[in-house]
Image: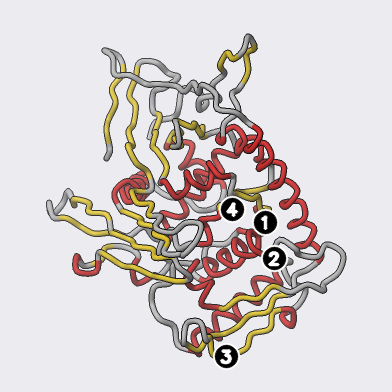
Amino acid sequence: MTVPKDEVLEQTETEHDGAVGVVVTSANIFMDSLSDGYTTSLSSHQLPLTISDKSLSGKVPSEMALISSSRDGWKITHKAAQIRNPKTDEIDHYFATKPAMTILDAVWDLINLKKCSLEQVGDTFRITFRKYDLRKYLEEINKSRSGSQINLQLDILQSSILEVASTKTSGQNGVKLTGAYFQNAYEVESDDPKIDGLYRATLHPVIAEDLMQGRFRDVEKTFLTGTSESNEIYKACIHRMRHQFINADASAETISFKMFFGDLLFSAGKMEKMTQGAMRRAINVLKDKMVEKGIISSKDNMISEWVFDADRCENDYRLVITPTVGWGESQKRSNAKYKIQNERLKSSSPQKIDVLEIQETAGTRIKRLN
C-alpha cells in the first residue's frame, strides 16, 4: 500500500435555489449525526450480518458454503465467497466472519473521522476511502492487519453474499435484500493525486435501507470495544438494548429489559448449537463484560433463568437486565438525537444530488473488483 497523496474527498457541495450548500439527503443527515467518541449502531446490527463461530472462520469446504439461520420472522442466509487461490489455482470458500466485521466497523469509524466519504446515489449509498487509511486506523486501535490480510477481507466482503428475508405478516412482509457487502467495488490509479489510490464500493441494501429510513443510533465507543469471540455476544446485547430498550431510566436503576439468550446468539451470528452449560458460561462472561463497561452495576443486575420458550418450543435462558443510570443517560441522549434526525428526514424534500463521478481517461485507470 502506498502513502496517500491527499486526504479523502470532502462532501460534495451543490447549487440549489440560488444558494450554495450541501444538499439534504439521508447521507447528509447521517453525517451530521456523527459525534466524536461515538460509533454507529444500525438497526440491522440486530441481525447476524456476519458469522462469529471460530470454526467457520477461514477456508470452509464447498459443501458448507451456504448457511442459514432464522428467528422472529427473519431468515438470514450467508453464501461464502469463492476466491481463487493463486498458489493452487483452486477455488477457496470463505464466509464473512469476525475479521470482515472488523473491516466493516473500521469503515464506519473512518466515516466518523472524515477519512471515508459517504455519498447517496438514488436509494444506494457509496463509500470511498483509501486502504492506506484503513490499515493505519486498524494499527491505531490495536487491530493491525497486513496489506494482504486487508485485501483478503475486502475480497470476502466483495464476493460473499448476504440475504436478509422477512417473513413477517405486517410491515415488511416478503422483503428480501440480497447482495455482496461491498458491491460494484473498484480501485483507482490516476495521475490526479486527489483520486489516486481511492477504493470505492456500494453498500449492501440492508445497510442502505437503514440509512434511508433513519434507522441508526449512536453508541459511545467505550461501550463497544473488545476483540474476543465472546465480545460478539456482548456487542449484540448492546445493539439490541440501544434500539429496543428506549425507555431506559436515567434517574434510578428501576427499569429492566428482558430477552432470551437465543436472541443474542442469533444477532451475534452464532450458527453452532450451544449446550446449556456452554450458554451458562457465556452468560457469566457477558455479565462480567457488562459490569466492566458500566452497563450494569453488578452481576446481580442481570438475572438469568432457564425456562421453556413456548413461542419457539425450546428451553432457553431468559435474561432480565437492569442497567445503570449511566446507560440510561446515554439512551436518553440517543433517543433525543434519533428523534431529531427522523424529523429532518420527514421534512426534507427530494433534491438533486451531486456526487463525484470518476471516469477512465488516459491518466486514470479504474480496476473493477467485482
Q: Quadrant of residue 244?
A: bottom right
Of pointers 3 and 4, the one earlier in the residue sequence:
4
Q: Is residue 47 left or right of residue 158?
A: right
- Nearer to us of marks 3 and 4 is 3
Q: Is residue 298 left or right of residue 304?
A: right
* Marks 4 and 1 in Cβ contact (< 8 Å): no
Disc 1 on helix, strand or loop?
A: helix
* Marks 1 and 2 in Cβ contact (< 8 Å): yes
Of pointers 2 and 4, the one earlier in the residue sequence:
4
Assess disc 2: are there few (<14), some (14-19) or many (≥20) residues with their C-alpha within 10 Å of its C-alpha. Answer: some
Residue with the mark numbered 2: 293
* Marks 3 and 4 in Cβ contact (< 8 Å): no
- Nearer to us of marks 2 and 4 is 4
- Nearer to us of marks 4 and 1 is 4
- Nearer to us of marks 3 and 2 is 3
Residue with the mark numbered 3: 307
Q: Position of residue 235 (x, y in %)?
A: 57, 63
Residue with the mark numbered 4: 41
Measure how far apart labels 1 and 3 are at the Cα level: 33 Å
Assess disc 4: are there few (<14), some (14-19) or many (≥20) residues with their C-alpha within 10 Å of its C-alpha. Answer: many
Measure how far apart labels 2 and 4 are at the Cα level: 17 Å
